Image: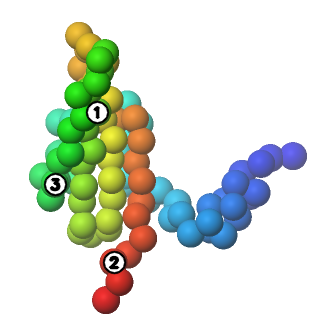
Amino acid sequence: MTRLPAVLLFLLLAGAAPPAPDDPPRGSSPDEVRRRLGKPQRISRQILAQRTVEQWHYDRPRRLRLVFERPRGQKPVLSSLHVLDPPNP
């Protein structure tokens, strides 16, 4: 028996939107994401001991937060994509 229906039900009940077909896949480079989604409205950076973490924030067409991880000496890759709740009017 597959767990996919249970996972989708959990996501719906938790308020998380499932990823859209045009969302960039994990492992994408920043250049690939920028080609798909355009320039982010805001970028947040954290510099840690052995890696840096960047969060790209988009407000349109959907509110998204994309997290790029860059281990020391390697190229950054997309590690996660978060669909955020719509803003309150």
Mark linked to residue 42:
3
Mark linked to residue 53:
1
Report crowding for label 1: few under 14, some 14 to 19, many 20 or more residues within 10 A (C-alpha).
Answer: some
**Which amino acid, by three-letter code, is at mark 3?**
Arg
First in sequence: mark 3 vs mark 2: 3
Q: Is residue 71 left or right of residue 8?
A: left
Q: Name the residue: 37% across, 31% down.
A: 27
Q: Position of residue 22 (x, y in %)?
A: 36, 54
Q: CA distance from mark 1 to mark 2?
A: 25 Å
The answer to whether any part of residue 38 appears in the image is no
Q: Name the residue: 31% across, 89% down.
A: 89
Q: Is residue 14 left or right of residue 39?
A: right
- Which residue is the site of mark 2? 87
Q: Name the residue: 24% across, 68% down.
A: 60
Labels in figure, total: 3
**Which amino acid, by three-letter code, is at mark 1?**
Val
First in sequence: mark 1 vs mark 3: 3
Residue closer to the observer: 52 or 21: 52
Q: CA distance from mark 1 to mark 3?
A: 14 Å
Q: Is there a contact, CB below 8 Å, between mark 1 and mark 2?
A: no
